[in-house]
Amino acid sequence: MEAKKFSSSSSSQISTPKERDFLNHLEAYLAKRDGVDKLLKISRYASKIILASSVLPETLPLSRRLKSFESSVGISRKAFRLGKFVQDINALRSASFDSNQDIILTLLAYGGEGLYYFVEQFVWLAKAGLIDAKHMVKLQKISAWAEFIGYFGSIALKTRDLKSILEAEHRLESSIEISMLRGNGYEKEAKDMKKLMEKRLMKKLSILQDFADGLMAFADIRDGKGLLSSPFFIASAGLLSALISTHKNWLSC
């Protein structure tokens, strides 16, 4: 689709917003628990990639310290999920349903994610030593299944949203073509097209992130066995997810 040609001719008429001060933006980003959590996620999976790639010999002291760091960050991240399941409860309460499919997919997406965050609190308590470690395996299995189901529902919902965005782009494209043929201005339509294109990009990135996280959850379900469960592949998926999420959170704060 040649949407760029519509916006380029009127780009001179569209004013660009003033760039935000970097340090103020960084302060706002770090004030959000999701912001700090995703920076920790980047640190963890970058460490995992280094360890899985065998760049460092296992006998090297730095390799052992990196393993300890990765494990510590993993436990620290779970603390940032305390009470996070409440956001999924509120999302379910405020959701509007137009069909039975809406109900099923929304329950899968938010119900699965909410259960995952709820169980993860007990996984953290078990790893911290407050709960008997004998419950760890069962809790982690429940957590992995809930996470996987949540991502399945989320991907389905976002794929449907992406289809709606594409349909809106096609309608707007037709409107711009008509305005061009009539010699009318289309500055507003060009702005709307730019917003839709940005929204489409972010939706695609969000689907890719969910797919990467879903692969990691699937690997946890299979206890790290299988072709798609190699440590390097899973660590790469985790880093990709972390980078996309960091980008999204940076733009939203």
Image (cartoon, rainbow, N blue to C red):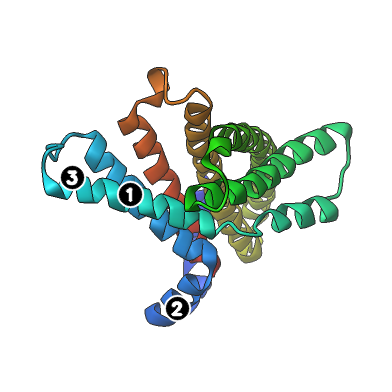
Q: Residue at x 68, y 35 (%)?
A: 153
Image quadrant holding the C terminus, namely bottom right
Whether the residues at callouts 1 and 2 have beta carbons within 8 Å, the answer is: no
Secondary structure beneath label 3: helix
Task: Kindly identify which residue carries mark 1.
Answer: 70
Whether the residues at callouts 3 and 2 have beta carbons within 8 Å, the answer is: no
Q: Residue at x 42, y 17 (%)?
A: 226
Q: CA distance from mark 1 to mark 2?
A: 25 Å
Q: CA distance from mark 3 to mark 2?
A: 32 Å
Q: Earlier in the sequence, mark 3 or mark 1?
A: 3
Residue type pointed to by label 3:
Ser
Residue type pointed to by label 1:
Glu
Secondary structure beneath label 1: helix
Residue 69, given in percent of the width and then of the height, sits at 30, 53
Residue 54, given in percent of the width and then of the height, sits at 17, 34
Residue type pointed to by label 2:
Glu
Q: CA distance from mark 3 to mark 1?
A: 11 Å
Task: Kindly identify which residue carries mark 2.
Answer: 27
Extreme residue in the top direction: 226
Task: Kindly identify which residue carries mark 3.
Answer: 63
Give the class, few, some or many, for how many residues have Cα within 10 Å of label 3's Cα (few <14, many ≥20): some
The answer to whether residue 164 is seen in the rendering is no
